[in-house]
Amino acid sequence: MLTDEITSQTKTSYLNKLIRIGCTKKLKSRTRSNIAHVANVRKIAFNSREQKNQLKITFFKKS
């Protein structure tokens, strides 16, 4: 449970950072929905990377 909390915190801070970057640039073409979309895409990538790491950990634990 503790690890889940940590990962969720890192995810939220990561997404907030992304949104902040998008807002500070203040590009006319980039709307809030666009930022949200980018954040979602990055989140999916972030999740898949985490899952790979988890797989590595379990693999090493078994051996």
Image (cartoon, rainbow, N blue to C red):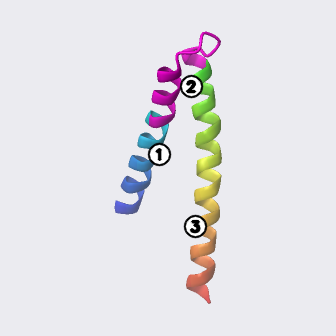
Please state the horizontal and vertical placement of residue 33, each as a whole percent of the image. Answer: 58, 18
Q: In terms of secondary structure, where does tag 3 sit?
A: helix
Residue 54's disc is 3
Which mark, residue 11? 1
Using the rendered view, name the quadrant where residue 54 is placed. Answer: bottom right
Badge 2 vs badge 3, beta-carbon distance below 8 Å: no
Residue name at image x 57 percent, y 75 percent: 57
Distance, label 1 to label 3, CA atoms, is: 16 Å
Please provide the residue range marked out in magenta.
Answer: 17-33
**Amino acid type for the residue under numbered disc 3:** Gln
- Give me the residue at 44% from left, 54% from top: 7
As displayed, is residue 20 above or below residue 9?
A: above
Q: Quadrant of the C terminus?
A: bottom right
SS assignment at label 2: helix
Q: Verify whether residue 21 appears in magenta.
A: yes
Q: Position of residue 10 (x, y in %)?
A: 43, 49
Q: Residues within 10 Å of mark 2 (few under 14, many from 20)?
A: some
